[in-house]
Image: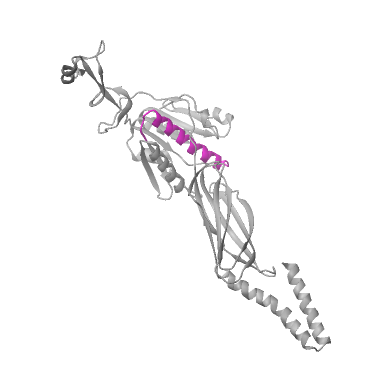
């Protein structure tokens, strides 16, 4: 572009000298024509700049991590002048990361037309990925002038965490929500309010479980199996306070630990609550999870509630505001402060209290101590959710 400007400047000087030395009409016409070309290019590009719209389009605003997803840049030129070259500068980054990936794209844009260009990216970590069109440089056909359009056009993609199989087991509990009508679809129990199954009599069955009316019709003893309530008060608290330079990997590990534990509980018919601090709403949110769809919806809300430099309230604040009586309490955290663990041990009425702690190295595991025998410490190395072993829920 600088070369072309120098070229036309030299050409105009030559035309002026030519006009001075030779007083022909042709020399005047040549001087006017050469001098008018940059002016015309400038005016046409100025008009074009005011008639260009830029948009970033995505098919879905939710994707899975490590999954390529398409991004489309749409440049609409409503003017009658074509753009010889449009140079688009794109950057994208996770809101929990200070590092941004940057690249550029080249394309022509015809007059009165929309030009689409697509590219694919992926994210190694879950969270919100911001995709930003920093600016687009447009050039006239002779590449004398350059104008910037489409500054800071952006969109966001929610990258969902993955769930992993963990090594754990579900404990039995007498703490049942008496007002619940949720029962196991696979196991019988002792709740007479709901019949799980009807079957033939076996030696040792209680007489009060015989279905006498049905038995008289079939000429054999038919026994009622009662249902097993599965609405056990359980809670997973997600503590998103992260004091580490590895903020993004730890955030990813916390989210995937939450997903893995929640999926394990659902697979074993154990409904539960997920509690987290919503920095945008400035309060604690509690979601009751009974199926995978509710879990997915809650994960999306947690991710969308995140923001840069957010301040998260500690679990102690929620515990202090609520009288918790639970079968299982799990705190997923990366900040296992002794005060938190002691507070959990002293102020939560629960049969099982777990602190699942995201750590960056095996050495860090050795430094974690509960400070109380009431809380089980389960370390999980960042990026290795399957390292969760023998967790009781």
Q: Position of residue 276 (x, y in %)?
A: 41, 41
Answer left or right for 235 relative to 240: left
- Residue 371 visible in image: no
In the rendered image, the residue lying farthest to the front is 218
Quarter of the image with the N terminus in it: bottom right
Q: Quadrant of residue 207?
A: top left
Q: Is residue 27 above or below residue 144?
A: below
339 left or right of 103 in image:
left
**Majority SS type along the magenta span:** helix
Q: Please, which residue is most extreme toward the top here?
A: 203
Q: Give the color scheme: rainbow, by chain, secondary structure or one colour.
A: one colour
Q: Name the residue: 54% across, 29% down.
A: 365
- On the image, which quarter does residue 205 sit in? top left
Q: Is residue 266 one of those drawn in magenta? A: yes
Vertical placement of 183 versus 125: above or below? above
Q: Nearer the viewer, residue 349 or 371?
A: 349
Q: The C terminus is located in which quarter?
A: top left
Quadrant in the rendering for residue 173: top left
What x and y, as percent, mark residue 314?
A: 43, 41
Question: Going by the picture, which residue comes out furthest to the right?
Answer: 21
Residue 148 shows in the view: yes
Q: Position of residue 9 (x, y in %)?
A: 76, 75
* Count of numbered circles on the image: 0
Over which residues does the magenta segment extend?
244-272
On whether residue 248 falls in the magenta region, the answer is yes
Percent x, y of residue 228:
29, 25
Q: Residue at x 40, y 35 (%)?
A: 236
């Amino acid at each position: 572009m600088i070369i072309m400007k120098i070229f036309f400047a030299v050409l105009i000087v030559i035309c002026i000298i030519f006009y001075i030395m030779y007083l022909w009409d042709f020399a005047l016409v040549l001087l006017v024509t050469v001098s008018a070309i940059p002016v015309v290019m400038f005016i046409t590009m100025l008009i074009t700049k005011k008639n260009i719209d830029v948009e970033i389009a995505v098919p879905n605003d939710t994707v899975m991590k490590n999954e390529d997803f398409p991004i489309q840049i749409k440049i609409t030129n409503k003017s009658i002048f074509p753009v010889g070259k449009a140079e688009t500068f794109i950057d994208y980054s996770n809101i929990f990361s200070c590092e941004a990936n940057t690249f550029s794209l080249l394309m022509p844009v015809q007059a009165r037309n929309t030009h689409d260009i697509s590219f694919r990216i992926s994210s190694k970590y879950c969270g919100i990925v911001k995709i930003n069109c920093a600016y687009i440089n447009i050039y006239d056909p002779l590449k004398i002038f350059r104008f910037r359009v489409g500054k800071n056009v952006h969109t966001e993609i929610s990258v969902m965490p993955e769930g992993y199989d963990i090594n754990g087991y579900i404990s039995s509990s007498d703490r049942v929500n008496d007002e619940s009508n949720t029962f196991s679809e696979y196991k019988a129990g002792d709740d007479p309010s709901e019949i799980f199954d009807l079957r033939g009599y076996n030696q040792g069955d209680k007489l009060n479980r015989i279905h006498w009316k049905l038995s008289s019709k079939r000429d054999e003893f038919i026994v009622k199996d009662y249902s097993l309530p599965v609405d056990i008060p359980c809670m997973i608290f997600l503590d998103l306070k992260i004091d580490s330079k590895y903020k993004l990997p730890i955030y990813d590990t916390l989210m995937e630990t939450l997903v893995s534990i929640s999926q394990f509980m659902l697979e074993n018919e154990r409904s539960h609550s997920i509690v987290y601090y919503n920095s945008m709403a400035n309060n604690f949110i509690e979601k009751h999870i009974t199926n995978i769809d509710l879990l997915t919806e809650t994960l999306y809300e947690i991710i969308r509630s995140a923001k840069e430099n957010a301040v998260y309230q500690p679990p102690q604040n929620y515990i202090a505001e609520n009288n918790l009586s639970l079968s299982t309490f799990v705190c997923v955290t990366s900040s296992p402060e002794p005060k938190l663990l002691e507070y959990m041990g002293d102020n939560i009425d629960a049969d099982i209290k777990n602190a699942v702690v995201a750590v960056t190295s095996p050495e860090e595991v050795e430094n974690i101590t509960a400070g109380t025998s009431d809380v089980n410490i389960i370390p999980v190395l960042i990026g290795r959710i399957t390292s969760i072993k023998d967790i009781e829920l």
